[in-house]
Image (tube, rainbow, N blue to C red):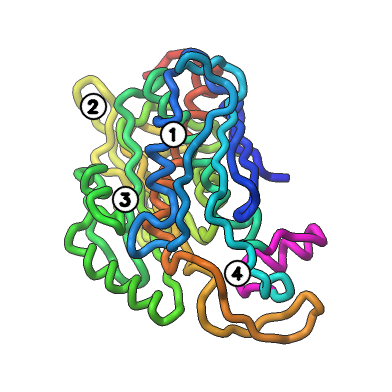
Amino acid sequence: MGSTFGNLFRLSTWGESHGGGVGVVVDGCPPQISLSEEDIQIDLDRRRPGQSEITTPRKEADRAEILSGTFEGLTLGTPIAVLVRNKDARPEAYSEMSEKFRPSHADYTYQAKYGIRNWQGGGRSSARETIGRVAAAAIAKKVIQKCFAPDLEILPFVESIGALQAEVDTDTVTREMIESNIVRTGDPNSVEKMIDYIKEIRGDGNSVGGVVGCVIRNVPVGLGMPVFDRLEADLAKGMLSLPATKGFEVGSGFEGTKMTGRDHNDPFRMVDGKVRTTSNRSGGVQGGISNGENIVFRVAFKPTATIMTEQETVSTNLENTELTGRGRHDACVLPRAVPMVEAMAALTLVDHMMRQRALCGDSQR
C-alpha cells in the first residue's frame, strides 16, 4: 500500500489523522543503540501542532511510546514500534467533507482509487502521518551518529514563503539560528516579515506555500547507487512523498540549465590529502554518488489545500456544489515542514550508509 520506505533500514507508518493514534514500525535498526522515548520526543515536539501562533491550533502533546525493540535503554536489533495517541481529534468538524471533495486535496483521488476514504481530517493523507517518519528519523540519527558519521549535520530551513525570500548562507547557518524563531528560517531579517505575512494570509481564510532549503554537512564519500538508486533520486522520492510537496532540486537545480558546462562544472583540487571541489553546483552528488561536499537541496511546498473560504467542488453524488473549509489547519506548512524534511533526509542517508557498508565495507578513497 506504499506505506514502507527504505531497504536495509525500513520503516512502515500507520494510522489516520482522527483515529486512535498514529505511529511507525522500524525494522533493520542495529542492536545496542542507546534509545529512549525522550530521544524521539525532541523531534516530535518540533513537528507537533499548536507550537506557535502561526501553526494550526490543534493541541496535541504527541507523546511517544516505545512498544517494542528496546531493553534497558538499548535497541535489540528487532522491530521497534512507536505509538503516538491522538488526544485532540474532532472528527465532527469534517462532517461536510464526507459528502464533498476538498479542491486540490486527496479526497477525490482516494475515493476514486479505493472506493472508500476516511474523511475525518483527511485520514491517511493528513500530515499527521509524518509523526511516524519523524519518530523513525530520531532513531536513524542515533544510528548515523554511532555507526557511520558522528559529525554529520542535517540543517533544513525555511528559504521562502510566498514571494518573501530569505537570505541563508548554507556554509554558515546553524541549528541554533534556525530554531531561534518560529518560522525556522536561517535569516533573522526575514522573520518578522514572514510572520506578518502568514498572519495576513490566515486572516483572509487563505493559505500560502514556499520552499524549504537544506544543507547536509560532513557527508561520507560514496553514498548512493548508480542508475536507479542514485542518492539524489532517493532523496527526491523521500521529499516528494511528504504531504503538499510539488518540487525538488539539488545543487544548481533548474538555474543550472541557464549555464554552460564551463561555468557549471565543479573543478577538482587536492586539499589536505583529500579530493575536493572548488565550487558546489553539483550539490554534493555526482553520478548519483556523494562526493564529500555539502549536499544542498530544496523542496517546494504548495499552499495548504484546505482554506476557510468558499470554493467550487463536486459532491460524492457527482453534483456541482460549493465547500467552505472547516477544522484546524496550517495557513502555511513551512515551519512544521522543516523537521519533516530533516526526517526524510536522515532516513535516506542511514539506509544508503548501511547499503554502502554491506556492499563495500569501510573502504573509501
Q: Residue 245: x percent and y percent? A: 51, 58
Dividing the image into 4 quarters, which one contains the C terminus?
top left
For the point 40% across and 59% down, which residue is it?
A: 334
Residue that badge 4 annotates: 93
State which tag comes first along the sequence, 1 or 2. 1
The reply to whether residue 143 is in sight is no
Question: CB of mark 2 within 8 Å of CB of mark 4?
Answer: no
Tell which tag, 1 or 2, sits nearer the viewer. Answer: 1
Segment colored magenta: 101-119
In percent of the image, x 38 and y 79: which residue is there?
203
Contact between marks 1 and 2 (CB within 8 A): the answer is: no
Q: Nearer the viewer, mark 2 or mark 3?
A: 2
State left or right for residue 290 relative to residue 196: right
Query: CA gap, disc 2 to disc 3?
Result: 20 Å
Residue 84 quadrant: top right
Mark 1 vs mark 2, CA separation in Å: 40 Å
Is residue 150 left or right of 141 when viewed as pictured?
Answer: left
Query: Between marks 2 and 4, how big is the CA–CA gap?
Result: 61 Å
First in sequence: mark 2 vs mark 3: 3
The answer to the question of whether label 4 and label 3 lie on touching residues, with beta carbons closer than 8 A, is no
Q: Residues within 10 Å of mark 1 (few under 14, many from 20)?
A: many
Specify few, some or many for label 3: CA neighbours under 10 Å numbering under 14, 14-19, or 20 or more.
few
Q: Which residue is mark 1?
A: 40
Name the residue tied to disc 2: 270
Q: Position of residue 325 (x, y in %)?
A: 56, 76
The residue indicated by pointer 3 is 262
Which kind of residue does numbered mark 1 sit on?
Answer: Ile
Q: Amino acid at mark 4?
A: Ala
Nearer to the camera, 337 or 241: 337
Q: Quadrant of residue 1?
A: top right
